[in-house]
Image (cartoon, rainbow, N blue to C red):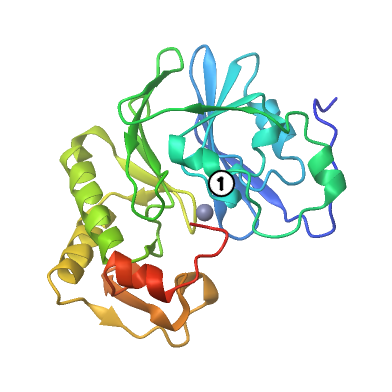
């Protein structure tokens, strides 16, 4: 019998679950959102709780056997954190605590009330923290650019790099030129560690992806920082590829790596845009 009672909603989207390795699951929700479940000998690590909709906690439960479950967020945006209250405690970066529970819009009250831990404990972790799952360690890197709470995870067991929303197979969604500089610095740091992983696992738009993306993202970001961006037209692109900032957004592309950003310094950016619930 399923462990968690579920409140189903009319706009719940379907899940697809598959094994990448015998001890590594991808739990895919709707069109393009992935969460990841890593099994060690003693513990399991759930990377993000997506929207927490439908049978999410039961799907996770059905994969972990009798292992203790640890839950962590790549960052504090609601498409990665909404299912957190199914669990008594969730690891995240300190900055995520302020907005991890901030929904993008109104939530169904019966669905919210169904989750057992509305005041779940938020445990801050930072660069250098290591999850030991038993025969499998996962190292935490702090990589803020898309978001000020972004954590990247280096799975030493299966040689995977979990990049959250810092970048995915379609783009990096950034804010201003300061974000692009931070992104470039982070990518260069990951590049220095690339001998330690074989594939990159973003949360959106396809996972895994090959690590050559990192080279293209570095080139793309470097050209923006140097004032010679590889700008392309955003006309006709699907909504998920146009970035967050309307007509202020520029898109630069190098091979398959694209960066959506606003070509303004942070102060000017803050004066021009209205920051929505997501920041
Ligand atoms: Zn996301």
Which residue is labeled 1 in the image?
99
The vertical placement of 115 against 144, above or below, is above
Q: Give x and y (percent) for residue 207.
A: 45, 50
Q: Secondary structure at mark 1?
A: loop
The vertical placement of 279 against 233, above or below, is above
Q: Residue at coordinates 43% horizontally, 88% vertically from top-left? A: 235
Q: Give x and y (percent) for residue 238.
A: 52, 77
Q: Is residue 198 left or right of residue 276?
A: left
Q: Residue at coordinates 53% horizontally, 38% vertically from top-left? A: 97
The vertical placement of 92 against 259, above or below, is above
Within-10-Å neighbours for mark 1: few <14, some 14–19, many 20+ = some
Name the outermost residue toward the left: 226
Q: Is residue 238 left or right of residue 27?
A: left
| Residue 272 shows in the view | yes
Q: Residue at coordinates 68% horizontally, 48% vertically from top-left? A: 15
Q: Give x and y (percent) for residue 179.
A: 30, 59
Q: Is residue 190 left or right of residue 248?
A: left
Q: Residue 248 lies in what quarter of the image?
A: bottom left
């Amino acid at each position: 019998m399923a462990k968690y009672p579920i409140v189903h909603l009319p706009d719940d989207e379907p899940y697809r679950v598959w094994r990448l390795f015998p001890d590594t699951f991808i739990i895919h929700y709707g069109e393009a959102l992935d969460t990841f479940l890593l099994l060690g000998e003693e513990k399991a690590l759930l990377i993000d709780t997506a929207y927490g909709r439908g049978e999410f906690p039961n799907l996770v439960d059905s994969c972990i056997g009798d292992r203790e479950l640890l839950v962590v967020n790549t960052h504090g945006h609601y498409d990665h954190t909404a299912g957190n209250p199914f669990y008594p405690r969730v690891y995240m970066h300190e900055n995520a605590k302020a907005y991890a529970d901030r929904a993008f819009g109104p939530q169904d009250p019966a669905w919210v009330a169904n989750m057992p831990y509305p005041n779940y404990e938020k445990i801050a972790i930072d660069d250098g923290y290591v999850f030991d799952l038993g025969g499998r360690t996962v190292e935490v890197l702090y990589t803020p650019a898309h978001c000020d709470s972004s954590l990247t995870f280096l799975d030493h067991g299966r040689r995977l790099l979990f990049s959250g929303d810092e970048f995915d197979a379609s783009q990096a969604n950034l804010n201003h030129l300061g974000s692009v500089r931070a992104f470039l610095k982070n990518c260069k740091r990951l590049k220095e560690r690339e001998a330690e992983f074989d594939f990159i696992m973003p949360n959106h738009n396809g996972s895994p992806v090959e690590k050559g993306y990192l080279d293209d993202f570095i080139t793309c970001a470097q050209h923006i920082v140097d004032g010679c961006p590889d700008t392309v037209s955003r006309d006709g692109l699907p909504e998920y590829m146009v970035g967050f900032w309307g007509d202020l957004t520029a898109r630069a592309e190098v091979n398959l790596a694209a960066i959506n950003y606003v070509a303004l310094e942070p102060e000017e950016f803050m004066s021009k845009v209205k920051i929505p619930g997501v920041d």
